[in-house]
Image: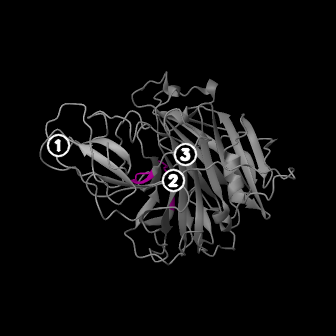
Amino acid sequence: MTHRLATVGFLVLTIASSVPVTAFGSDDPDAGAPPSPAEWHKAMIQTPPGRDGCFEVVHPNTAWQEVPCAPAVDLGPIGVPPTVPAPSVVDSGTPAPGLSAMGAGTAAPGPLAVGGGVSGFVVSVAYPNDTLAFAQGFFPQVMGVTSISSSAGDNNNTYSLQLNTNTFSTAACNGTADLANCSGWQQFTYQNLQDHGEVRMWYFLLHWGKACDTSHGWIQYEADSCYQYTDAISVDAQPISNLSTLEVTGTASSSQDTVYFYYLASGVWTIKSVSKNSVLGLAQGWKFAEYNIFGIGGSYNTATLNPGSSIVVAMDAWAFPPGGGLGQSPADPTICVSGAAPTAEWNSLNLFGGCCPYPDINGYWFFESNTGAANRPACPTDPAKPTVQASISPLQAWPAPLSLIWTDGDGEATAVFMAATSTGAPAPVDETVYFQDQNDHSNQGWQDSTFGQGDQIGTSGWYCVYNGPVSGRG
């Protein structure tokens, strides 16, 4: 979803709601034609296995099948795999629906290195009290990629696909030697190893500050942190030529976290997943998600792609207010934020340009390349800004409560701001959402509002007192 704030006092909203998809069972003769793989994928994620273990399902079936998990072997965070031959088949850079072909864009600012805790893009909640319940990463366009290797030794065709969270407060830090600095961090990953791939989740207690509790599965990580991981589900090794068909999804609820790996195997779409009762309570603190292709074999390792490589990275995320979660609709909007991304691994590409809304989903895409910005697709056209602004007559010193009447502009919604002053004008910030009740996001529109209870524009003294449909009164 995109939120575009125009000039003073006016808000234009373009909202695309998430719509639940009914799953189709191949054994149901009355269900009609099966859904597309994309629709089926979304439906299966909204009907998770519901218990700890490793599971798989093949399109268009809708019943999760429990399968044996791979035994947990301590390879260190993100693993140190041996080598496998590099592939020779490549993608063509064919555009995804609604996305222009590579090469259709214009030169963009850049470059910026990708990863290493230095730079990248994350998809974040737009509303401070929201949390993510779902995030997904994929590569809708890939051009010129013929090989990849990780810097941890001679690791041809080894890489990791990481869906990473922000750090967050967690009850698992109780008992730490440094409660003020201890935090949780979680990863949903696919690791491409020597002769197979592995899907699993990783959990970290950063700055635990003392010996890790091995009786609960925690392993020492660097000087003062701990980590553990789930069992894995095995996948056939995926050559880098398959990159545009690979997707990693992570979900979090109050009771359980699940990682899903969606891929094409011998012409059949397959999902493999690992579920586990929540270790860190991610659902209470998940604010943003990072996704990309990185090195494998531990912190700071780099995935090196061959010269001439360009990829589009896309992320989708669903955010919900307190009490909401996966399976509820609609999801709240999200925003794309640039800056220091959380993982310590890198890839050898550079970022060019900014983050663009991805068509038809609550997500965004960005471009990475080692050839410059020439192949960058064009961003979709932004929603049209209003040409006529809402207007309201200046108020005198009236006793409360007040009834406000204004004249609408030609946009899709109106935001009204008020300050305890007789001079000046509000200057709302683009790409910022302002609520008339910062503690209750459902209290918007025609409900009464209290001056000072809505979101303030910075420290200006101007507060939002209405944010809702155009109708010309308050």
Query: Within the image, what quadrant is residue 460 found in?
Result: top left
Q: How many marks?
A: 3
The disc, 2 or 3, on the residue closer to the chain's N-terminal end is: 3
Tell me the distance, in whole angstroms, between the alpha carbons under discs 2 and 3. Answer: 34 Å
Magenta stretch contains residue 328: no
Given residues 331 and 13, the one toward you in this image is: 13
In the displayed structure, 242 sits above or below 459; it is below
Tell me the distance, in whole angstroms, between the alpha carbons under discs 2 and 1. Answer: 56 Å
The disc, 2 or 1, on the residue closer to the chain's N-terminal end is: 2
Given residues 441 and 106, the one toward you in this image is: 441
Highlighted magenta segment, given as a residue range: 335-347
Q: Amino acid at mark 1?
A: Leu
In the displayed structure, 365 sits above or below 209; it is below
The answer to whether one can see residue 226 in this image is no
Q: Residue at x 47, y 49 (%)?
A: 333
Tell me the distance, in whole angstroms, between the alpha carbons under discs 1 and 3. Answer: 37 Å
Is disc 3 placed on a helix, strand or loop?
Answer: loop
Q: Which residue is mark 2?
A: 345
The disc, 1 or 3, on the residue closer to the chain's N-terminal end is: 3
Q: Residue at x 24, y 54 (%)?
A: 391
Q: Which residue is mark 3?
A: 330
Do the numbered discs 1 and 3 sit on residues whose CB atoms are within 8 Å? no
Is disc 1 placed on a helix, strand or loop?
Answer: loop
In the displayed structure, 71 sits above or below 2; it is above
